[in-house]
Amino acid sequence: MSQTADPSGARTHARAQAGTRAEAMPTIPAAAATDLPPGVAAADVTWDETIAGGGYAGRQLARSARLRLVDLKGDACASLLIFNAERPIERLNVADTLKVQWNAYLGAGSLLLSDMGRVLMSILEDTAGAHDGFCGASNEAGNAAKYGDGGNYGRHPNARDRFMLGVAKFGLGHRDVHPCVNLFKGLLFAADATTEPQVGPFAPGRQVTLRADMDLLVVIANCPHVLDPRTDYLVSPLRATAWRGPVTPPDDPIRNATPEGLRAFQNVEDYFLR
């Protein structure tokens, strides 16, 4: 008979797992996180989690928090949804993020803008250099055609359904799964308008550090990029670490880099004055 066949045995088995670490799981308490960025005190860490390939995670981040994402083995794809935590009807607008900044490529110094003209997050540091604001999230039909199945409970989950699970934990639903940005996987545009996916695998350890410029809900799905041509379901673990930091100051170089960006930051500052 299985040792978990009766309540007493199941309890004993469950308690015996105390202290067990898996490759992908949250660090609890977050202050116990190790391998932190230089200058970050453990007491300031508010979230530390390794997200499995095919996994997802979500967190509420306070204004001024920093979020570092690390592609641990060179094949992660961090698909990102962002909401105003106070009023989730305001969320990431990928089209405005690209057109307002006159740039098809995201990287250090880029802003992630809301559909109400405010800065949700700023990209402070980027060692990856390959990101995508055009292709969106994979879906069940596409994954099924490529891998044989694509639902949440099969072997090849898709990013859109992972988003559905993530937003549900904040009381949101299907209509709230909006277009995303994909970090660590990119898209190059040639002069003749043809595109070239940049899907790797890349060197391990690539990092992106973002600053929360509003109080946010952040949902991340770590699934293969929708244009990944490989027929195997290949995606590696992603580490997310967040910590407290200072609010963006008036003399911040990213804030003042362009007239369009400055106006988006001023819209944020006006919002918090209310």
Image (cartoon, grey):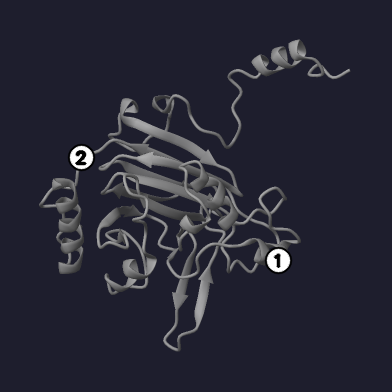
Q: CA distance from mark 1 to mark 2?
A: 45 Å
Name the residue: 62% across, 56% down: 158
Name the residue: 38% across, 55% down: 127
Q: Which residue in the structure is indicated by mark 1?
A: 146
**Residue 246 has which mark?**
2
Name the residue: 32% across, 63% down: 115
12 left or right, relative to 61? right
83 left or right, relative to 157? left
Q: Quadrant of the N terminus?
A: top right
On screen, 267 above or below 52? Answer: below
> Upstream in the sequence, badge 1 or badge 2?
1
64 left or right, relative to 80? left
53 left or right, relative to 130? right
Looking at this view, name the residue that lies furthest to the right.
1
Q: Nearer the viewer, residue 76 or 147?
A: 147
- The amino acid sitting under disc 1 is Lys
